[in-house]
Amino acid sequence: MKKAFYLETFGCQMNVVDSEQIVDLLHQIGYAQVPSAELADLVLLNTCSVRDKAERKVYGHLGRFKPIKDLRPELIIAVGGCVAQQEGERMLDKVPYLDLVFGTHNIHRLPELVQQVEERRRRGVETDFLDRETRLNLFPERTQRDSVTRFVTVMQGCDNFCSYCIVPHVRGREISRPSADIIAEVRHLVAHGAREVTLLGQNVNSYGIRDHGELSFAQLLEQVNAIDGLQRLRFATSHPKDLTDELISCFGRLDKLCKHIHLPMQSGSDRILRLMNRGYSAGDYLGKVEQLKKNCPEILFTTDIIVGFPGETEDDFQATLDLVEQVGYADAYTFLYSPRIETAAARMPDDQPPHQKQQRFDRLLELQRRISADIWKKDAEQVLPVLVEGVSKQGQGQLFGRTDWNRIVNFNGTAELIGSIVPVRIVKVFRNSHLGELAAPQ
Ligand code: SF4
């Protein structure tokens, strides 16, 4: 009988891709995926440490599996991802019923580590970072999945050391994959049904800058754009300081590149941006936004913003609100600052009372909600091309897809539309999605 595993994934798209690799590796050693921990012989959490109190949440989450382990001591519990990388041995000390901790560079060793635990030879911790060459050789073969949209990792790690960010500490230094491998992978995915790919990296637009003779990120986009059968192309997440003129010129020029960019701003205050070690000013940022709008007037922006960074004054915060108004984001992921261990910002004095941070956060949210609503309501009654991704969770007979601007649209339709781009009239605009109806071809 096949053994069963249950997997939960937290955090960003990079973790989603890592989880695909975890699934493939576990299939290779005879495990089948099941939808609940109660049915599993192996439970895995693929964790993220970017958000507030991430470690505490993972420890809390692990507590849910203890009663199952009490009933079935042979159950294996494993934690991977960024919290595992950060905590390492500490996790085994704190959670006596935890069997395995594997870091961000050790996913490929999962079959061997699981088998060691199965044989009860050890409780395991593997969090060593690997050298560049080894990592480059470890990019997995992508297996076929029944999915219209796929993520393709083009680089990993980050060398920027933004003062608040734990990513360089838990994901290691930047490496870029050879462009030939990326193009081959996209071709393979398209041949197996993918219609949209998102090129991924922690700092995706620094792709290739450390590799002499490699394509620039803009050149990579051009080559992927030329792949027959691919219909849409996106990338995430880009750093404003590495947004070159060449890359900006891709918008409006490459026909498959969607008219949306996620461009983390973090703060509108030059003083705070310096403290964050972001490498650009608010003026630089706005200049790039203006250039993008000039090249591609329909482009929409989304962003990340941190509120309550150590030392943030009312003037600093006002500068953030001003920049939010000036850019006019379609959406923003807003975060209340919280210190991450090992980062430079965690050592900065922070004397703002929590209620003040919360008030600022609420003001920003209110402003952003107004701007988002103004932008999305313009879609009402428009007929928009929607790439149909699958059956909607909303109800029977409904499909879901996305517009060029990455907006989710639910509408009635039949499954044979999955994978094609269809015209959809937007009949209702909600805060996070649209409701539509199929329209006649334009
Ligand atoms: S660019 Fe900055 S925020 Fe983004 S992953 Fe690197 S260090 Fe973190």
Image (cartoon, rainbow, N blue to C red):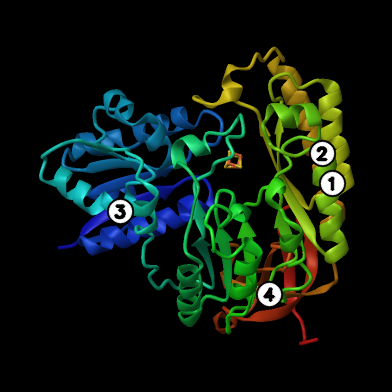
User: Residue at label 2?
Assistant: 282
Who's the residue at 69% across and 18% down the image? 354
CB under 8 Å between callouts 1 and 2?
A: yes
Secondary structure found at label 3: helix
Q: Position of residue 194 (x, y in %)?
A: 52, 75
Q: Quadrant of ligand 1?
A: top right
Distance, label 3 to label 1, CA atoms, is 41 Å
Q: Amino acid at mark 3?
A: His
Please state if 327 lies on the left or on the right of 345 as rendered.
Answer: right
Which is more N-terminal, label 3 or label 4?
3
Who's the residue at 80% across and 20% down the image? 313
Q: Amino acid at mark 4?
A: Lys
Which is more N-terminal, label 4 or label 2?
4
User: Residue at label 4?
Assistant: 256
Q: Name the disc covering residue 108, or none.
A: 3
Secondary structure found at label 2: helix
Residue sitting at the far front: 212
Secondary structure found at label 1: helix
Locate the N terminus and report the quarter of the image it occupies. Answer: bottom left
Classify mark 3 as within 8 Å of ligand 1 or not, answering yes or no: no
Who's the residue at 62% across and 62% down the image? 217
Q: Name the disc covering residue 286, or none.
A: 1
Distance, label 4 to label 1, CA atoms, is 25 Å
Q: Position of residue 396 (x, y in %)?
A: 57, 70
Residue 188, picture quadrant: bottom left
